[in-house]
Each structure stands twice: as structure tokens, then as C-alpha cells.
Amino acid sequence: MGIDFRSPTRRAALLAVVLALSLLALACGGGGSIPEDPRVLEIGSLAETATYALRDFGPSGIYKYLAPEVQDRCPLEQFVQALEGEVPPLGFQGLKKVKLEDSQAQVTVIWIIGVSTEDVEWRFAQDDDGQWRVLQLPGAEECG
């Protein structure tokens, strides 16, 4: 007998705990280089959401978080094909390094893979509305 996480309330509570722990990991730095900048929390939140979308729904799940210019050059079918064969993450641990460059950021995202972690390099871009979007992630380099 265990806790039933099929309940939306329990899933929301679990997500809140995971997010709080992730933000704590961000605040502690995790041995990387993370600037004290409010944009880092926005990027971290997107990285976590996109990681779990990729885990739960595959490449089509993360597609809506891509920057419009990436979607323009890489249609969904082509994007799914580009990420075929990539090992999906089991979870999101946090951010390791963040380098902010105007409206872009180069970020080392820590994925949980099996019983270990893996550092993956992502690029993010801020759109005209101030929302962060995924500009580049492993496996999608050849797309478009």
C-alpha cells in the first residue's frame, strides 16, 4: 500500500515539492556557476517543465516550448525524427551553469538518467513578450 498519485491534488503537491527542491538546488549552486538574476528562475522553471514534457510525452511534448524560429525551421515530424534514439531523462535535478547573454542563455541542465545524472547543454532565448523558449537542446542540432 502506498500513496496514490493519480489524484490531481496529490500530483500538484508533489510537483510543488519537486519545484521547491529544484529551486533550492538552484540557490545552492550545485557546484556550477549560476548568477543571481531573476531570469535564472524563469529559465530553470522552463527547463524543468520541458524536461518532464520530454520524459512524459517524448519529443512532441517539448515541441511547444521551442522558440518560434526553431519551430519554423524544424516541423514537428522532423523534430521527432531528429530526437529519435536520444535517451529521455527520468527527471530534472537542477541547473549547473548559466551564462546569460542579453536575451539568450547557455545553460547546463542536470538530467536524472537511470541511477545517475547527466549534464546536457541547452540554449534558451527570450521572445518579444519576455517568455523564455528552448533554442537548442541535444539531438536537435541537425533539425532543419
Image (spheres, rainbow, N blue to C red):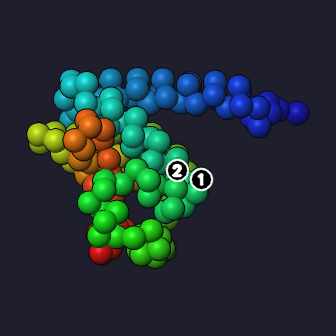
Q: Depth check: 114 or 62 in front?
A: 62
Q: Give the vertical position of 23 relative to 56 (above or below).
A: above
Instruction: Where is residue 40? Give x, y as percent.
Output: 27, 32
Instruction: Where is residue 45? Give x, y as percent.
Output: 40, 35
Q: Which quadrant does the C terminus fall into? A: bottom left
- So how many labels did they put on this image? 2
Question: Is any atom of residue 2 visible in this view?
Answer: yes
Going by the numbered disc 1, the residue's amino acid type is: Asp
Locate residue 29: give its quadrant: top left
Label 1 belongs to which residue?
56
Locate residue 126: give its quadrant: top left
Residue at (54, 30) in percent of width and height: 18
In the displayed structure, does residue 90 sit left or right of residue 70? right
Residue at (30, 41) in percent of width and height: 132
Instruction: Where is residue 60? Give x, y as percent.
Output: 51, 62
> Secondary structure beneath disc 2?
helix
Q: Are marks 2 and 1 in contact (CB under 8 Å)?
A: yes
Q: Depth check: 45 or 74 in front?
A: 74
Label 2 belongs to which residue?
53
Going by the numbered disc 2, the residue's amino acid type is: Ala
Question: Is any atom of residue 96 visible in this view?
Answer: no
Q: Depth check: 71 or 44 in front?
A: 71
In the displayed structure, does residue 27 sit left or right of residue 20? left
How crowded pointer 1 is (Cα within 10 Å; few <14, some 14-19, many 20+) is rated as: some
Residue at (59, 53) in percent of width and height: 56
Q: Give the vertical position of 55 relative to 9 (above or below).
A: below
Tag on residue 29? none
